[in-house]
Amino acid sequence: MNRPLAYVFMALHICGAAGTYILGKAAATGFDNPAALTFARAAGSALILLLCTGTLIPAPRFQAREWARICFLGILLIPLNQYSFLVGLARTAPSHPALFYALTPMGVLCLHALLRRKWPSRRDMIRILCALIGVAVVLRPWAADADLASWRTGDLWIMGAVASWVIYTVAAAPICRYHSPLTVTAWSLIAGTLVFSPVGVPALIRFPFAALSPDAWAGLVWMMLVTSVIMMLIWNQLLRHLAPVQVAISANVQPLATTGIVFLLSASGLLTTDQDLALPFWIGMLLICYGVVAILVQPNEDAPHGE
């Protein structure tokens, strides 16, 4: 993959992510049962991918050991990442998930260091600490405001989703180099949907879909088609050609893109839900972005290069 095409894919992924944080919020608040929303999103995406298998998506040709990895990726995707993300999104401001997902490259670097049993340099540890201080500033555990307390609960769920996404990014990279990323995406998502079905099917059957607002429906369709299909295909396609940390760099632009869109929509009156655009949020965003970008723009000899 040449550099311009990689940038195009990253830009598309960033745009899709910004839409997910904003439109997904309407779906997350519209569904009072996150398990029903998680399964509706996953099942719809799995059906789309199944219908494309054999044409746009190559049929799976995994060995038994690789099927085990596909199932592991599926568990990371649906029960851990998507469920935690939707629970958290319903309880926090849309700008917060975008900010915490910017920690993805740092998480990938730390996980690589852990797997190689070699700690990052002292300089990188200081930058990691700077990013974590930024997280603390955004969470504001010292504040007693009721809205902030509710957002903190959602933020902790989002951070759990980020952790599972970091593990997915590292774990998916090797298999994406030996098999089509389209096939890996499709069958990891299908496997995760099957694993989650004992929880999701009963929740979906009991859910009153007639009570959903048009905004909630729009958010569900966006996450089903754009987030879980198009964005996942782009992410795994990038993982086939680039190192995981290089792919994760695109997450650094998401806070700026999402916050900018939120600010414009809020100023125009099109977005009426509570937003966090106060000074501590901006300070936290600067600390997080500085800590992550400072590590990435000066890679050391131990940084992962796609192995």
Image (cartoon, rainbow, N blue to C red):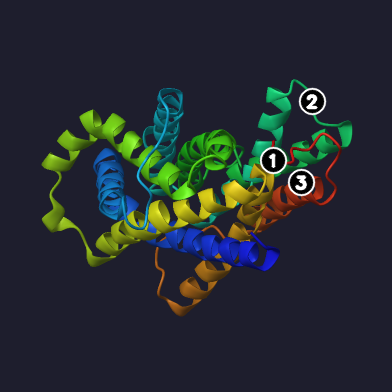
**Secondary structure category for the residue under label 1:** loop
Please identify the residue farthest to the bottom as the structure is shown.
268
The answer to whether 60 is drawn above or below residue 4 in the figure is above
Q: From what the image shows, is residue 122 above or below residue 243? A: above
What is the distance, in whole Å, between disc 2 and disc 3 at their CAs? 17 Å
Secondary structure beneath dot 2 equals loop
Q: Position of residue 144 (x, y in %)?
A: 54, 41
The residue sitting at 39% across, 51% down in the picture is: 228
Q: Quadrant of residue 80?
A: top left
Q: Locate residue 121 relative to residue 43 in the image: left or right.
A: right
> Residue extending furthest top?
117
Residue identifier under label 3: 291
Earlier along the polypeptide chain: callout 1 or callout 3?
3
Q: Position of residue 143 (x, y in %)?
A: 58, 42
Going by the numbered disc 1, the residue's amino acid type is Gly
Which dot marks residue 306? 1
Question: Which of label 2 and label 3 is nearer to you?
Answer: 2
In the image, residue 224 above or below residue 61 = below
Q: What secondary structure is found at the residue carrying circle 3?
A: helix
Residue 34 visible to an observer of this rendering: yes
Circle 2 residue = 119
Mark 2–mark 1 distance (CA, rounded to whole Å): 18 Å
Viewer-nearest of labels 2 and 1? 1
